[in-house]
Amino acid sequence: MAEKYMRKIQNSKGKRQNKGSSLIITIVFVAVFGLLLAGLAQVTTTQLRVGTQRQEFIQAFEIAEAGLNYYRWHLAHDPEDYYDNNDPGTSPGPYIHSYKDNGGVTIGRFELTITPPGNGSTIVRVRSVGYLLDALTKKRTLEALFGIPSFADNLFLINGAVAFSSTATVSGTIHSNSGIRFDGVTDNFVESAVATYQCLPQHGCNPAQEKPGVWGSGGPQSFFRFPVPAIDFAAVTSDLSELKTLAQAEGFYRGTISQPGYHVTLRTDSTFDLWQVNSIYSSKTIRTQAFLGNFPYPATQLLFFEDDVWVDGTIDGRLTIVAAKLPSGGNPDIIINNNILYAQRDGSDVLGLIAQRNVQVRRNAPDILFIDAVMLAQTGKVFYDVGSGTLKDELHVYGSILSSESPYFKALAANGGVISGYELTFYTFDGNLFFGPPPHFPTTGQYERISFEEIN
């Protein structure tokens, strides 16, 4: 019996020990589960907070972008308002606008700061800061550049027919409202607005004959495109009477003189030397002249002469030179007297030459000639006087050529060979002109977004 009693006592102790162990395990399990639940809750809370913050940042970005879209729309309706309907000349901002959700409830704001274009440029800088009203610290800042394309967006824009020799190297688009003979090398489109045209002896067709809108031995011929829509050359030309009025009021103006005209030499300190040309040779080479003085570029960046103008030098800044006689006319020319160079080719320097009739390279110009400019012949042509029969070495044009009549810098034989003028010609489009044409040059279309970035 004693043994049986002892076994009962031992069994009883074992049960109590088992119960105690189970309790400890349960407590540990509950504690661990509690910790897991707490950790899970913390993770969930963190994820919710991060998700909320992310959503706030996304919405702030959308609000800032809405600010940019709003001002592009505003410029489309009022292209010269850079002050968000405030008085011109006031602070550039910030101009604050409410942002509403689909239910019409204001949930945020965007703040706009607007930088107007510089002289001669169409580029407007708009900075937009967007944020939610209940998350003022979660701001996003976006900045965009908007610009109106200029008519100086082609290397060549020609109203008449044109020919390029096998010694021509072209970097930029050629557009003609007539036909094009192209024997050179290009890296861009060669476009004609006609399906066929009458090629004449001055373009190497002797006798004259009908040719496709674009033809020749050059290429790549995959770049030949015709017919394409014509460009209204009248829309390219500037309103000369408006430019004359502006120059007389705020620019630099000189009227008609009894002598052949004026001579402008551009200087690298944003000034120019001015001479009165008293006599010339038959080739429009200056024979005698009298110094009139050194002058700074006017704030309007416009020089207007009612006479022929000889131009040379190196430009530091942005300037447009006009030669025109108004209102009766008289068709003055701009004569390129020597090299015309930009101090920098980064868009900060640009020169526009607008002639009521011709832009002419004089016969005695250097054998290797550099012209950095946009040349616009409103009723005539851009050309070199090939009548002397002299063969010169190289012509380098950096900019753009806009010519009502057929431009030329060399005379061609029937086989396309050069018999007079500049044997090697290199034409390069200045890409800065697309949104930064010379001062007072015509533009077309509406504001386009040039660039877009987030500012940290």
Image: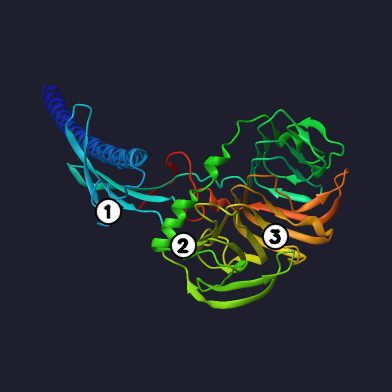
As drawn, the label of residue 301 is 2
Say which element carries label 1.
Answer: loop
Of callouts 2 and 1, the N-terminal one: 1
Residue occupying image coordinates x 23% and y 52%: 87
Which corner quadrant of the image does residue 284 belong to?
bottom right
Question: What percent of the width, then of the height, locates residue 160?
Answer: 68, 40
Gap in angstroms between the C-alphas marked 2 and 1? 21 Å
Alpha carbon separation for disc pair 2 and 3: 23 Å
Expressed as whole percent of the image width and height from the top left, the position of residue 23 reads: 15, 31
Residue under numbered circle 3: 361
Which residue position holds label 1? Answer: 88
What number of labels is visible? 3
In three-dimensional space, the C-alpha distance between marks 3 and 1, rounded to whole angstroms, equals: 43 Å
Residue 289 locus on image (x, y percent): 63, 75
Can residue 422 be spotted in the picture?
A: no
Closest to the observer, 94 or 335: 335
- For the residue pair 420 and 38, the one nearer the viewer reads as 420
Q: Earlier in the sequence, mark 2 or mark 3?
A: 2
Q: Nearer the viewer, mark 2 or mark 1?
A: 2
299 vs 93: above or below: below
Q: Viewer-nearest of labels 3 and 1?
A: 3
Whether residue 396 is situated above or below residue 271 in the rendered picture = above
Q: Amino acid at mark 2?
A: Gln
Question: Which circle marks residue 121 in the picture?
Answer: none
Q: Residue at x 14, y 22 (%)?
A: 4
What amino acid is at disc 3? Val
